[in-house]
Amino acid sequence: MKEKQDITTIKAPKNKGEQILDAATELFAVNGFHNTSISQIAKKAGVAKGSVYNYFESKQALLEALIMSGVELGEQMMQMAKKSDNARETLKILTNIHFDLLQNDLKHWKFYMALMLQPGILESVKGILKERVAKSVKVYEDLFTALGSEQPHLAARAFFATLDGISLQVMADLEDYPLEEMKVYVLKILLDFDKEEEK
Amino acid sequence: MKEKQDITTIKAPKNKGEQILDAATELFAVNGFHNTSISQIAKKAGVAKGSVYNYFESKQALLEALIMSGVELGEQMMQMAKKSDNARETLKILTNIHFDLLQNDLKHWKFYMALMLQPGILESVKGILKERVAKSVKVYEDLFTALGSEQPHLAARAFFATLDGISLQVMADLEDYPLEEMKVYVLKILLDFDKEEEK
Amino acid sequence: MKEKQDITTIKAPKNKGEQILDAATELFAVNGFHNTSISQIAKKAGVAKGSVYNYFESKQALLEALIMSGVELGEQMMQMAKKSDNARETLKILTNIHFDLLQNDLKHWKFYMALMLQPGILESVKGILKERVAKSVKVYEDLFTALGSEQPHLAARAFFATLDGISLQVMADLEDYPLEEMKVYVLKILLDFDKEEEK
Amino acid sequence: MKEKQDITTIKAPKNKGEQILDAATELFAVNGFHNTSISQIAKKAGVAKGSVYNYFESKQALLEALIMSGVELGEQMMQMAKKSDNARETLKILTNIHFDLLQNDLKHWKFYMALMLQPGILESVKGILKERVAKSVKVYEDLFTALGSEQPHLAARAFFATLDGISLQVMADLEDYPLEEMKVYVLKILLDFDKEEEK
DNA sequence: TATGAATGAGTGTTCATTCAT
DNA sequence: GATGAATGAACACTCATTCAT
């Protein structure tokens, strides 16, 4: 049903369901979930207010659909990581992808991260997100294991945390974050750290 | 009810303005800004709904006042850091404080972090928060400079990011995050890394 | 599904119009007019929502058609009554039929009675219902005249009222109404009363 | 808080709560529960839409308050009945009251009776109404017992049913029901019947 | 200064009805 | 005829804000 070609590529919307999803993503990211009304979404999507409910049972359901589509993205990313058999290369690639997404899809990221923190909204969805994080951590853990890390789980958590923290700061800082430099720095530190661990 | 020392100490509320602020902090943290009504705040603070408007011009203004009071906390923390002259010790202390706050004041942290990401709410406050982050980064940067780091600004950013990322994951993960282990791990890595950088 | 004889027999639905009417009757009876949506009716009838409008101009029109079909039932009942020439026997039979319908077709009765009371819905239909009641009263009046009642019109009204009142109470009371006993009692009183009147 | 002087007397509304209740009673009676919007009630009561919710938690709660106030009326009526010690007289009085209410408070009656039949609305309230009916029946039962009726419970039910049935017909018939004549007739029959039973 | 009743714009959601296919 | 996606008016309800007391 959905056709995606590249992680960061999203095709032009074809049907109303996608139009609505896109509009909602945009608006939730910019104004937040609670500050976005169904009316706004409908107007932005170019459909009638009632039509939203032909595609999504409720505002909550719309939100969940949104999240699920994001989860798929992470899923794909993780799949890519598993294909390579050089741990260091893979880590580099993942790190690069992470920074690329950060630069190209800032709004979506912001939305997802805000979501993880927003209280009350989504007990129903939290499980999904937690599962996704757990999977990611596992992937990193395997990579660090391959690199000979003594505490691969903690190393993975820490590495993941650094990336997440950078994301967070980018989102809050917005304009003037030295993102490119940070990427280079992290990759360098990563390598040094790896080498040391590999010894 | 809670008895804490130093940084996290909050004096017993004296006047209605503070009562309101406290109630709002608690409720915003638990239910989010949009899910908290003035009525709830007033009831929790033990004042009449109308009285809230004698102390704060609007719900927005209340939020901003609340953020400002939080900023002071960070300010104090940074002051403490400057008093020590052993960079490595200071880093350890700051890291410890960070983790302690994470364990004891999770709700407030969650609230502040969510705030940084929540769009739309606080263009008016963003500047203040950015300034605070900049100051923190500067403090860390000075510490890394003292440690002989070649790229102290990036190192500070990265370190700060790691802590922030861990905070984020704790908040999202909630129950089963290996927080204590992470603290030990981060401190260990920090030391090793420092030693290497010091060479 | 149900197999009944005579008056209460409903033929198997042949065309969509009847399917829709049947579905609507069932749903209106159970959930009320305002709580039943066209979608529900369509789904229950096994047709598309739009198709309902090929058979009935509007929800109102559907309701009116439904009422008219119910009126016919009363019509048939009254016809039966006229065929007998023993007034007392006829009264007994009618009373029995009344109680039988009450036991077997409670939902439909409830619906019709509610309809008579529900304001606003059916100014358009009220005339028809009034006419039906008038006819029924006339039938009873003739019977009481035959029995020698001095005020046959009032007697008919009173008798009819008793039956209606019992119906009403049954519907409201629902589970624990002593319906069978009431039938026996009414028939007994009726006989005594008749005998007295006949003197 | 409430001051009533006579069963059929309702004082001019003083506060908004009563204004709203009155408006709601009027509109529910005329248009039905589902066909009456909060906006209409507010407008008729001369208050803002939101104000309705300062007095009643929900539309349902408003309905229930309405019913409860009606229950009180019945309660008072029953109290009156218990004060007399002449069963026949009491029956007469109650019957008279019943007919008077029917003439003077038709809208309220209509509303209550419609309510008893309307499906889905008020499972929460049904218990109250059933209890009220049970009490009334008990009062009548005692009266018939005092009159020496052999089956006082059934006699009470039947008598009550007749009154209810008359009410029902009045409501449906509306304009041209011979109410006064029916009253005389019922009282006469009642007396005869009583005499016979008393023998 | 303190109060809370009053307000009304705004929300998510439903659903009778239309109409292009 | 048959369909069901699309529509938008209407609904119950919320809540930030005001203001007379």
Image: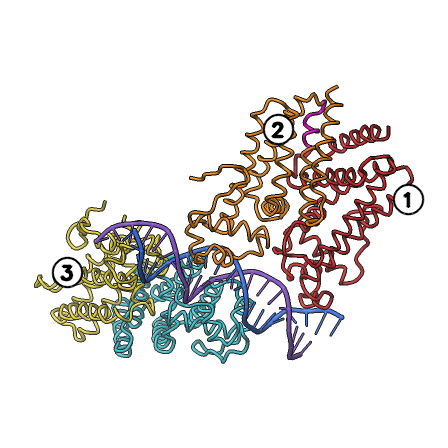
Chain colours: A orange, B red, C yellow, D cyan, E blue, F purple
Amino acid on which the number 1 mark rests in the picture: Lys
Q: Choose between B145 and C37: the one closer to the eye.
A: B145
Q: Is residue B96 visible?
A: no
In which image quadrant can residue C191 be found? bottom left
Residue situated in front as seen by the camera: B199 or C164: B199
Quadrant where the image shows the C terminus of chain B: top right
SS at mark 1 in the image: helix
User: Is residue C128 left or right of B164 when viewed as pictured?
Assistant: left
Protein chain holding label 2:
A
Q: Nearer the viewer, mark 3 or mark 2?
A: 2
Mark identifier at residue B83: 1
Question: CB of mark 1 within 8 Å of CB of mark 2?
Answer: no
| Dominant secondary structure of the residues highlighted in magenta in the image | helix
- The stretch of residues the image draws in magenta is A150-157
- Amino acid carrying label 3: it is Gln
Whether residue B40 appears in this view of the structure is: yes
Q: Which mark is residue D34?
A: none
Location of mark 2 (residue): A138
Question: What residue sits right under mark 3 in the picture?
Answer: C76
* Dot 3 crowding, Cα within 10 Å, few <14, some 14–19, many 20+: few
Magenta-colored stretch includes residue A156: yes
